[in-house]
Amino acid sequence: MAAANQLQGLKEEATCSVCLEYFTDPVSLECGHVFCLSCITRCWEGLETYFPCPQCRETSKNKTLTPNRHLGNIVELLKQLQTPSAALQDETLCRDHKEKLKLFCEDDRISICVICREAKEHKQHKVRPIPEAAQEYKVSAPQVCAMNGV
């Protein structure tokens, strides 16, 4: 149980407060807060005289961004720790055909493989790629920069 709490804490520390994803190209500001390079760039878009931290709002007169390579390495290690095990990967295979589940059947609301798609049960159903279907069903808060509404 303690290990799960520690892992959750590590995930939170490796997450950008702007995009709520793991850091990508993390950079530190003068105040010490860290953001993805692309997130802070979007937040500061159009600003020329002062550059506020989206978290603490401390301002800087210049765009001083220090790459945080150590944190970037930690994020990569954390991602590797979360790579699904072989047992979990087996769950992404079709029980009948042992093919990867790549499609989502809208009518039956289940994941199917390309062979199932051609089977009688699904042939006339509306089917689309899983990532596309996931985007529609995904419930997420708008990703907005607190400072600029970006």
Image: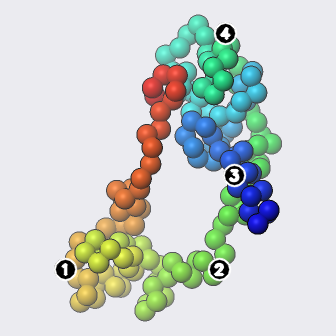
Mark 1–mark 2 contact, CB under 8 Å?
no
The residue where tag 4 is placed is 61
Q: Is residue 76 visible?
A: no
Give coordinates of residue 83: x percent, y percent: 66, 66
Q: Above or below — where is 63 with respect to 88?
A: above
Sequence-first tag of 2 and 3: 3
Give coordinates of residue 48: x percent, y percent: 55, 10
Sequence-first tag of 3 and 4: 3
Sequence-first tag of 2 and 4: 4
- Most foreground residue, 7 or 86: 7
- Mark 3 residue crowding within 10 angstroms, few (<14) / some (14–19) / many (20+): some
Q: CA distance from mark 1 to mark 2?
A: 33 Å
State the mark number for residue 124: 1
Q: Residue at x 25, y 75 (%)?
A: 107
- Mark 2 residue crowding within 10 angstroms, few (<14) / some (14–19) / many (20+): few
In this rendering, the label closer to the viewer, 3 or 1: 3
Residue at the left extreme of this rendering:
124
- Most foreground residue, 44 or 107: 107
Query: Mark 3 falls on what kind of element?
Result: helix
The residue where tag 3 is placed is 11
State the mark number for residue 86: 2
In this rendering, the label closer to the viewer, 2 or 3: 3
